[in-house]
Amino acid sequence: MLLEEILRYMQTLKKDFGLQLSLHGPKTMLGDFPDYRIHSNPYCMLIKQSPQLWHKCHRQQSKIVSHEVSSCGTCFAGVFEYIIPLRTGAGEKTQVFMCISGYRNDARAQRQLRMLERSFGMDMQVLKAAYEKYLRPMPDAPPDAEVLAPLVKMLEQYFSNPKNRRGSNSDYIYAHAIAYIHQHYREKIRLEDICNFCHCSKSYISHMFKKRTGCSVSNYIMQLRLEKAKKLLERERITVKAAAEAVGFPEPYYFSNSFKKYFNIAPSAIRKDDLHEI
């Protein structure tokens, strides 16, 4: 299927070329790309903890949709990005664009960060540390057009079919909730934390998760931690206790019981080698 080819290629660009890709446009068109709906870089996620900046980011994306040519620039938070419009149908204006982001513009950083501190009450030290840690230096040249060309062609072909245009307003919020959980699953995440980040009520987030995943938020987090622990045990030279702590289980016995119930196998049975427990 074309969608599967697109997702595989996007994953390849992310893994092999280090490109941070996202798709932006009408929420009713991007339902098949939940993992690529937002800028999930930890710096961008930090910025969007502010409800004012959440909406500012979304408004800026809406304005970019009207661009008909490829461009580049720095957003209000100091993130440099490349913008590639996608032609979604003959005679139609650009409705969807692809963004390659995650770069820092050091020449403008101080002014942008001071604005965030002064106008939105952000902590300057926290901002600067995240900016330097999670954003890469601005490249000397744009990403290789030949590498991106197959993806652009596939996406334009996909969106040219009206049947492939689907989605809802909740997709955008769901994508942020999932990104937040994946970045903080090692910590003690409360439902309130997710709601505060997404600027939504508990009932809305709970209902959305149940509808989309078939389980509660807490069960989703539990399953994610167990899946991450399983990969650690299969790939790393690590004890069961260390694996439990690495994914956010402070109690190894609870972890072992949950692991066995979920996978129908004890965690000690799938360790990479015959380590003794510490």
Image (cartoon, helix red, strand yellow):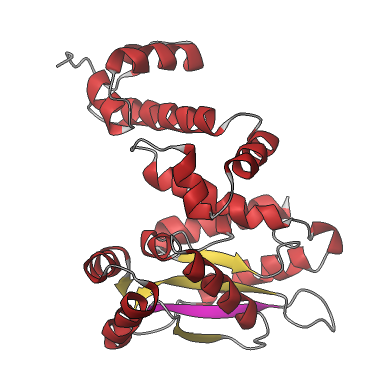
Residue 239 in view of the camera: no
- Decide whether residue 83 is among the magenta residues: yes
Q: Is residue 253 above or below residue 210?
A: above
The reply, left or right, for residue 48 in relation to residue 199 is left
Q: Please state which of residues 133 and 87 is positioned toward the viewer in this rendering.
A: 133
Q: Residue at image x 30%, y 86%?
A: 111
Q: Please state which of residues 148 and 256 is positioned toward the viewer in this rendering.
A: 256
- Decide whether residue 202 is among the magenta residues: no
Quadrant hosting residue 115: bottom left
Quadrant hosting residue 105: bottom left
Residue 127 in view of the camera: yes
| x and y, in percent, of residue 99 in the image | 54, 72
Instruction: Kindly give the residue lying farthest to the left in the view shown.
Output: 278
Q: Which region is colored magenta?
A: 78-86
Looking at the rendering, in which quadrant would you find the C terminus? top left
| x and y, in percent, of residue 245 in the image | 26, 28
| x and y, in percent, of residue 271 in the image | 30, 19
Quadrant hosting residue 69: bottom right
The reply, left or right, for residue 252 in relation to residue 264 is left
Q: Residue at image x 42%, y 55%?
A: 15
Q: Is residue 208 above or below residue 277?
A: below
The main secondary structure of the magenta stretch is strand
Q: Residue at image x 47%, y 42%?
A: 192
Q: Is residue 187 above or below residue 253?
A: below
The mark tally for this picture is 0
| x and y, in percent, of residue 8 in the image | 57, 52
